[in-house]
Structure formats: C-alpha cells, structure tokens
C-alpha cells in the first residue's frame, strides 16, 4: 500500500501501486533428436514432464533448420513405421512450439569441443549460438563432453532424467 503524498494518515492509496508479478524467464533448451523422438513419437511417459515443461512455457525449446531437418529425416526411418501423416504431425507439434534460431551470435566466436559424432556438432553449435541454458540428450558422445566440463559458462548438457530432476 502506498500513501498518496499530502494525504498522510488518511488511508487513501495510489492506484498505480498494483502489485507486479514477474514470471521467471523460461529455461532455453535444445533437445536433440533422440529426445524429440521420445517426446513426439513414442510419448514416453517417463519424459512426459519434459514435454509439459515446453508446452507450458516453463521451457523454451530452440531449434534451427539443420536440427529440424534431422528430426524430419529420422521420422522417416522404416524402424518407426510412421505414416506420412504421423511424421508430419510429430514434426509440426514440435516445430510450432520451438523458437527457430537460424542466426549466429557473438557467442559463435567461442570455440566448442569437437563431438566424436559429427552429426551431433550441430546441437552444440545451436546451444552456443542461441544462448541456451541446457542441451538435453541421451547421446553418449554428447554426454562425454559434459563430463569433461569443457562447456562451463556456456550451457549444460543433461540427460532427460537429469533435466527432469533439475526441473522439480
């Protein structure tokens, strides 16, 4: 309650003193393809809270053309036996929720370690260039980089299980 000037003790209150509630900024997260398949193809119940975090705005998923292209390609694998409609639905469900970051940033000058699997380098670059907080993955090559702690100060690499534990 804010007293109006000159009205001390009268009980009159300024109306421009309405409380302001600031929501915390969403956590900026890059999800690699194996996590996306778990969330958007199999709807893996263990990781349902990850998708809920993104759907609710608590997390802001970040992608780019290269990462979306890989997701599109993987959705077409015969192993998954998805129809064209199922592939399109999974891709659209993710693509409409994610921020598309296709530019570079000043952080791009920061040298990244080389991932053993060259196909995974794009996720490291996206996390760096977009200013992501986390890269969520189950990929062994990416997780090895996290154990070496060479990305301190840029972003963290977490397993889906670790991301769930940290979100609670």
Image (cartoon, rainbow, N blue to C red):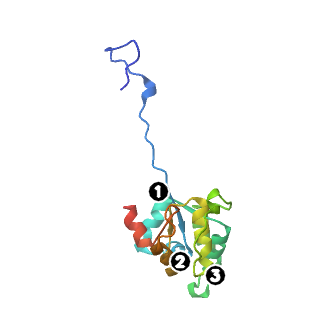
Q: Is residue 19 visible?
A: yes
* Label 2 or label 3, whichever comes before in sequence order: 2
* Label 2 or label 1, whichever comes before in sequence order: 2
In this view, the residue farthest toward the bottom is 79
- Front residue of 95 and 112: 112
Which residue shows up at 49% across the image and 64% down it?
Answer: 152
The span from disc 3 to disc 1 (Cα, nearest Å) is: 30 Å
Q: Can you give x and y, in whole percent of width and height, for residue 76 in the image? A: 63, 81
Which residue shows up at 46% across the image and 56% down it?
Answer: 58
Question: Residue 34's mark?
Answer: 2
Q: Can you give x and y, in whole percent of width and height, for residue 121 in the image? A: 61, 74
**In which quadrant is the C terminus drawn?**
bottom left
The span from disc 2 to disc 1 (Cα, nearest Å) is: 21 Å
Which residue shows up at 42% across the image and 66% down it?
Answer: 49
Closest to the camera, between mark 3 and mark 1, is 1
Q: Which picture quadrant has residue 71? A: bottom right
* Side (left or right) of 104 relative to 55: right
Which residue shows up at 40% across the image and 72% down it?
Answer: 161
Q: Can you give x and y, in whole percent of width and height, for residue 35 in the image? A: 51, 74
Closest to the camera, between mark 2 and mark 3, is 2
* Label 3 or label 1, whichever comes before in sequence order: 1
The span from disc 2 to disc 3 (Cα, nearest Å) is: 14 Å
């Amino acid at each position: 309650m804010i007293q109006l000037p000159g009205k001390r003790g009268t009980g009159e209150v300024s109306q421009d003193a309405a409380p302001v509630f600031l929501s915390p900024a969403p956590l900026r997260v890059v999800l690699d393809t194996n996590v996306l398949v778990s969330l958007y193809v199999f709807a893996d119940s263990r990781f349902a809270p990850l998708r809920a975090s993104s759907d609710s705005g608590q997390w802001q998923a970040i992608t780019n053309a290269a990462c979306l292209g890989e997701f599109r390609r993987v959705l077409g694998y015969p192993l998954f036996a998805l129809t064209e409609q199922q592939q399109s639905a999974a891709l659209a469900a993710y693509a409409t929720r994610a921020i598309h970051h296709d530019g570079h940033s000043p952080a791009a000058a920061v040298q990244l370690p080389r991932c053993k699997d060259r196909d995974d380098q794009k996720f490291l670059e996206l996390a760096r260039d977009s200013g992501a907080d986390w890269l969520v993955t189950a990929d062994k090559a990416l997780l090895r980089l996290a154990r070496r702690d060479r990305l301190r100060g840029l972003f963290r690499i977490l397993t889906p299980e670790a991301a769930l534990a940290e979100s609670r």
